[in-house]
Image (spheres, rainbow, N blue to C red):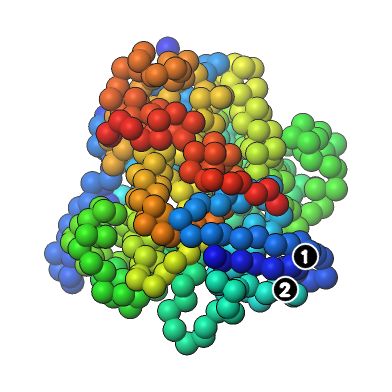
Amino acid sequence: MSLLQIENLCLSFRHYRGLVHEAQTSVLRGIGFDVDRGEVLAVIGGSGAGKSLVAQALFGVLPGNALVSGIMRFEGVLIDKTTRPRLLGRRMALLPQSSSHLDPMANCSSQLRWAARRGGRTIRKADAQAAFLRFGLPASVGKAFPHELSGGMARRVMMAIATITEPDLLVADEPTAGLDAGNAETILSQLRAAADAGGGVILITHSLPEALKFADRVVMIENGQLVGTEAAADFTGSGASLRSHYGQALWQALPQNAFGAANA
Amino acid sequence: MLEGRDLSFGYAGTSLFEQLSLAVPPRTIVGLTGRSGRGKSSLGRILAGHLRPSSGTVVIDGQPRKCGALDSVQYLHQTPIFAFNPRWRIERILSEAWPCDADTRRSLEIPDALLRRYPHELSGGELQRVAVLRALAPGVRYLIADEITAALDPITQARLWRVLQERVADGLGILAISHDRALLQRIAGTVRAL
């Protein structure tokens, strides 16, 4: 059984047109994929393609005017309002895109301990320090407030928070945005390690070269629709073994390849 | 030729670069790369006249830049949403800069339907195309492209640079700031590391 199954996920936003009339804008249509244990699945798409919305739908953190339909299963159990409290922060965790998700009023050590407590564990100070150390952070980070951290450190603190309960599924939303190559590499290797240790990882990104280096499979989303699923290893040479037209166009558009010779 | 001569700059007592000189000739794309925090964007903003260097000068064809007219050097933001008035429609944002001709608009794939929308109703790729269109007013001879395609997918990135490369063949000079070495190798004649 797959760790996570998503079938026919559709999402639209309800909004007012004028004062009275309501309209719906469809943003995701018929998205479906599986994630297995030991696998890093990359979800690729341009900005505005809807890839972050998939994560938000999964974790039930969409704005109030969102209408979601479709089936999401975690180890065969339907993910909904009743099962989410037992899953979120315990079995599945989200690594958010921006460091604005850290509490600006609390130091990092408290935030880590709260995350552990919410996930049903209590940890001592030494455990917190060990968790930070695992991501190459000095013990002094525990006392630091979020505004005292650089972008790369903040991301690693969020990584420590997301993984403190050893979740089976980790969803990373653009984990390398705004990081330099060294920091990006560190974060991505840690995601890879989480998968190699038997978890499942969803890596949401707009960077194909980055995804190919660390992911096993690539799911491509364009304009809210699934436009192809490929094995990462098939993105090689002229891209002849790629099955989807979009996958080939994406591969050809890379500066290191033909830089857009094929038409999407 | 757009030239920065002996530029020095820093924030709050720390120096980012000193006595740095850089030239962007017309009909060329010059690449600028370097680790985060080295001052790439600051250098770009100085060349575009948005920041004043602590010492050194910026000259265009040997002359200091003129004030009070359209600046012939325009700066393109990594996140274009910050470069637009959120309460204006695209139509007004564009016409404030110049009466955009249909050919340029077509080459950047900006349909009429987009003009009636507000900046937040556009995708990242659409926004960046609008920002480029706005900057391509007649009289603009140099662009400072600060990571303009870093947030875009490869297909959108390739299309946008194709349009800019055509402009460069017609005489435009571009300073392309990017972390992506493969991209700079593809588009830039020379690459400078900071």
In the image: residue A114, left or right of residue A51: right
Question: In this rendering, is residue A118 above or below B72?
Answer: above
Amino acid marked by disc 1 = Gln
User: Toward the viewer: A46 or A142?
Assistant: A46
Residue B123 visible? The answer is no
Are dots 1 and 2 in contact, CB under 8 Å?
yes
For marks 1 and 2, the one nearer the N-term is: 1
Give the residue pinned by disc 1.
B19
Would residue B167 be visible to someone looking at this image?
yes
The residue singled out by tag 2 in the image is B56
Q: Nearer the viewer, residue B179 or A160?
A: B179
Q: CA distance from mark 1 to mark 2?
A: 7 Å
Q: Please state the chain letter of the residue tagged with numbered disc 1 in the rendered image.
A: B
Q: Who is closer to the viewer here, A27 or A113?
A: A27
Same-chain check, marks 1 and 2: yes
Q: Give the SS element for disc 1.
A: strand
Residue A175 in the image: above or below residue A256? below
